[in-house]
Image: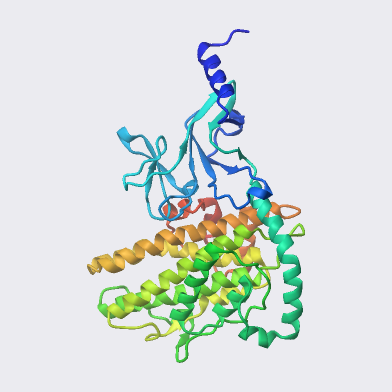
Amino acid sequence: MEFTNDLISAVNEIVTDSKWQKIGPIDEFLGKDNILLYPDITEDEEQTQIDNIVLFCIGPSEFYAIDCACPHEGGPLELGDIEDTGNEGLAIICPWHSYDFNLKDGTSSTGLKTNVYETRTANGDLYIKCGHVISLTNTKDQVKVKKAQENEEEETIQKLEQLQTKDEKEADSPTECLCGIAKDVLNTSDPMKKSELTRAHYANWLKKRLSVGYAQMPDQPKRQEGLQIKDPGRIKRGKGGTLESRIAMIHSLANIEQWAIDLSWDVMGRFSTVKINDKPLPMEFFDDFIKVADDEAKHFAMLNERLEILGSFFGALPVHNGLWQSAEETSYDLLARLAIVHMVHEARGLDVHPKTKQRFGAQKDEDSVALMDVIYRDEITHVACGMKWFTWLCKNMNPSLEPVETFHKLVKKHFKGYLKPPFNTEGRLIAGMTEEWYTPLVKK
């Protein structure tokens, strides 16, 4: 059998350079939007801060590899869109803040730069040049889960014993676990204090994870004294044509963000003991939702500040508790909670964004327009988070469930009425929600 000079040269280079690693047969990757590659670490190396790599397949057999985390604020580049920038070539656009990164050299028009990795195909296999060992299997997550299981088992037993006998005293004790923090935030009535606590706890979480632990979540979060609560259908949101109307719109959004803070903490605390095939939820689940909680806290603070600039304050108008009604409906089922709260309601927020932004823009309220854009970019990642863990749960159950079909069943069971267009198909698609997820749930 004769081999071409190019093939011989490529194979020789791969063999002689230890940084080249075989990923697998090319046929396994063709047709896939992206493939995640993970640092293949041992338990001793668990603290090593090495980013995941996303591999993009363009066209019939063109591959690009780049670090997953956006160097701006850590946005998930694997969820971004790929755009052709002309002479500059292909670029991946971060879904959080639209930072662009060239897939060939990692440069950005913003001045930032990220790591890219050379790829090569030879003899039907795909290779990548990388300075550390990588794998299609997330061994880092496995190590974290193992350590979390070992560290939390004894702590959880001790905390359960204390909580079962001293539940009232526990509310006044230091919050030594994530669930204790969740309970503390839910029991905080002042919305700005709730926001500040959330942001502080998230910053601390990034420095040092606490154990997940256990705490009994309250039936309902506390609210500030004097807040008027009405049924959702009796709240006037306004259309932005007057200052009073714009204040009403921002006030309504601030109320949603306050509930969203509580819902993010509640999904962590209420379902902390859920086990899939006798294994606890991965720590990555809590990493993701505490980040969502921090985003929602940031949004509330920004909206509250905007209300004050416009001459009002949060609590000046009535609010509704529709989101918590959905939380109560799904309080016993994590799949249902993710489906209704984080995939129906959060996705609906993407749908209304264009009209809301247009109404502020029509009144030349550019500061509110900019605020809407910040919230919108973050909310896309929240829908993606719900999608991620809903799909993960379905696939890891025994027996496994078909995600889209399961979503349809849960929405029909727990959501009142049909999903209503118009849909922000672009925003939903960025979050990973294709039309097959929601169009069958529209009234025909």
316 to the left or right of 18: left
Q: How many marks?
A: 0
Percent across and percent down for residue 191 are 46, 80
The reply to whether residue 330 is in sight is: no
Residue that lies at the very extreme toward the front in this rendered image? 44
Identify the residue shown where x is 55% and y is 14%: 8
Residue that lies at the very extreme toward the top in this rendered image? 2
Q: Quadrant of the N terminus?
A: top right
Residue that lies at the very extreme toward the bottom in this rendered image? 226
Q: Is residue 56 above or below residue 149?
A: above
293 to the left or right of 145: left
Q: Is residue 192 above or below residue 296?
A: below
**Where on the picture, by quarter, is residue 363?**
bottom left
Percent across and percent down for residue 235 are 42, 81
Residue that lies at the very extreme toward the left in this rendered image? 364
Which is nearer the eye, 388 or 285?
285
The reply to whether residue 326 is in sight is: yes
Which is nearer the eye, 180 or 241?
180
Percent across and percent down for residue 208 are 57, 64
Q: How is the image coloured?
A: rainbow
**Where on the picture, by quarter, is residue 219?**
bottom right
Identify the residue shown where x is 69% and y is 60%: 148
Which is nearer the eye, 179 or 299?
179
Percent across and percent down for residue 95 are 43, 52
